[in-house]
C-alpha cells in the first residue's frame, strides 16, 4: 500500500449535508463516498500536462534538498524536459 497522508477539510454545512445525503443514497460510508469523488478528480489531474510538470519540478527540488542530485544536474534535467 502506498504511503497515506491525512487531509482535513472544512465545508459549509449545506455542502457537507449534501455529501452525507449522497453517501446515504449510494449506501456508502461518507469517507468512501468522498474518496470516490476525489479519485475521479485525481484521475483527471493525472492527465493534465501542467500537473506532471509541477510534480517533476517538486521531485527535482526534493532531490536537491536531500542531496541526491546537485543543483546543476537538476537544471540540466529541467532543460531536457526531465530526462537525465
Image (cartoon, rainbow, N blue to C red):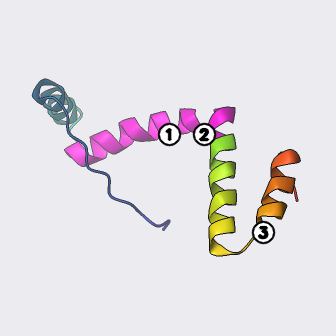
Highlighted magenta segment, given as a residue range: 29-52
Specify whether residue 82 is in view. no
The residue that mark 1 highlights is 42
Going from N to C along the chain, the mark reached first, 3 or 1, is: 1
| Residue 79: image location, x then y, percent | 86, 46
| Residue 17: image location, x then y, percent | 12, 29
Query: Crowding at label 3, few (<14), some or many (≥20) Cα neighbours within 10 Å?
Result: some
Quadrant in which residue 69 is drawn = bottom right
Query: Crowding at label 1, few (<14), some or many (≥20) Cα neighbours within 10 Å?
Result: few
- Name the mark nearer the viewer: 2 or 3: 3
Residue 69 vs residue 84: left or right? left
Q: Tell me whether the residue at label 3 lies in contact with that at label 1, contact meaning CB atoms closer than 8 angstroms.
A: no
Q: In which quadrant is the C terminus drawn? A: bottom right
- Most foreground residue, 70 or 82: 70
Residue 11 vs residue 56: left or right? left
Could you give the CA–CA distance between mark 3 and mark 1, rounded to whole angstroms? 31 Å
The residue that mark 2 highlights is 46
- Most foreground residue, 6 or 25: 6
The residue that mark 3 highlights is 70
- Most foreground residue, 22 or 12: 12
Residue at image coords 83%, 63%: 73
Quadrant in which residue 67 is drawn = bottom right
Amino acid at each position: 500500500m502506498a504511503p497515506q497522508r491525512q487531509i482535513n477539510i472544512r465545508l459549509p454545512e449545506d455542502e457537507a449535508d449534501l455529501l452525507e445525503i449522497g453517501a446515504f443514497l449510494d449506501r456508502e460510508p461518507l469517507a468512501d463516498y468522498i474518496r470516490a469523488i476525489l479519485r475521479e478528480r485525481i484521475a483527471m489531474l493525472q492527465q493534465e500536462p501542467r500537473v506532471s510538470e509541477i510534480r517533476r519540478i517538486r521531485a527535482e527540488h526534493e532531490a536537491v534538498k536531500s542531496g541526491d542530485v546537485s543543483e546543476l544536474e537538476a537544471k540540466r534535467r529541467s532543460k531536457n524536459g526531465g530526462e537525465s
